[in-house]
Image: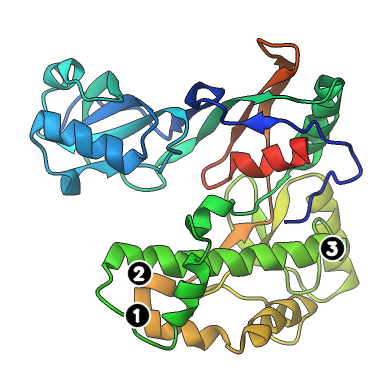
Amino acid sequence: MQLITRDLPGTGGLHKATPDDFIVDELPAYAASGEGTHTFLRIEKRGLTTAEAVARLCAALDVSPRDAGTAGQKDRQALTRQWISLPDVDPTRALAASAEGVRVLEAARHGHKLRTGHLAGNRFTLTLRGVVADGLERAHAVVERLVAGGLANYFGQQRFGARGDNAARGKQLLSAEPRGRISPNERRMLVSAYQSELFNRYLDGRIVDGLLTQPLAGDVLKKTDTGGLFTVDDTAAALADAAARLAARAVVVTGPMYGHKMMSPPPGTASAAREDALLAAEGIDATAFKVLGRLAEGTRRPLLVPVGAASVRAGDAPDSLVLEFTLPPGAYATVLLAEVTK
């Protein structure tokens, strides 16, 4: 990972010393309607993965975990609050349910199951311990820079598995069947890890070459207000217009989550050359993902994401500090922590 605040000194320090040092609040995309056959539950969990928390709560309510819906996965070593959905569960009964490590904070009926990605973002309250003497001032400088310019949208290390080999295993699925039985969910996870690793390497290259906010001919840009995608024409006027819109943060450059249906830069452009070169170094091209069908259709991912409502304050000990900020769905707080701590 290439730090975009590498010219600013870091704070050092340890995060996740305890689960309460890493607090995440999921921001819902919409409120429950109050009517319907599903029930939205806002839960609080500590020291559990989302899957573990859902399984425990489903056991307490006599519901199959397969029928549960979640908007996103949250860290195990943390105190997190998020929304899940369960079918045919009375809200009053849900509020009275108890399971080790899980509490139900709110419950209301809704007309459909909660789906992956149905969230507006996440709010983080993170405590760093053992920071340097002037850590508060250093953190302020880094966070101010990130608020002004955005955070590099890397996938965090947790994306690649405890052993760090998920991406390599995902690449193997392009050319060979895995040894032993593998579930559809695991297959999806491994393929996504490989796509994520390639995206991170593409982002590395754009940062190293000073092209994080500099448009290239053929770049696929995303409108920050509507999410619409379009490519930059290979003309001086189009490149100048794209540069102005990038500076105003009206658009953002996207990178490839490679797949056989991904929107790509027009052939022969500078942007296409960069994306093709990365695949060529892997010994493949975009058509290699066709064998995986719907698992690897591909998409575009912004190279930068906004950091919202950010603040830095002194912690509960002389060598601690607290960071608070909001990130959009799919962005990793650990990437921001790496910028702060160095």
Badge 1 or badge 3: first in the primary sequence:
1
Q: Nearer the viewer, residue 244 or 255?
A: 255
Q: Quadrant of the C terminus?
A: top right
Q: Is residue 35 left or right of residue 302?
A: left
Residue drawn at x 29%, y 40% is 52
Q: How many marks?
A: 3
- Give the image location of residue 255, x and y in percent: 65, 64
Task: Say whether marks 2 and 1 touch (CB < 8 Å).
Answer: yes
Callout 3 secondary element:
helix
Badge 2 or badge 1: first in the primary sequence:
1
Residue drawn at x 50%, y 87% is 287
Q: Is residue 288 left or right of residue 223?
A: left
Q: Is residue 53 left or right of residue 196?
A: left
Judging by the rendered image, the residue that carries numbered circle 1 is: 178
- Give the image location of residue 75, x and y in percent: 46, 38
Image height of 62 relative to 223, above or below: above
Q: Nearer the viewer, residue 277 or 19?
A: 19
Q: Nearer the viewer, residue 75 or 47?
A: 47
Q: Quadrant of the N terminus?
A: bottom right
Q: Residues within 10 Å of mark 3 (few under 14, many from 20)?
A: few
Label 2, label 1: how many angstroms apart (C-alpha)? 9 Å
- Give the image location of residue 309, x and y in percent: 66, 25
- Give the image location of residue 208, x and y in percent: 84, 63
Which image quarter: residue 311? Answer: top right
Which image quarter: residue 302? Answer: bottom right
Judging by the rendered image, the residue that carries numbered circle 2 is: 187
Q: Residues within 10 Å of mark 1 (few under 14, many from 20)?
A: few
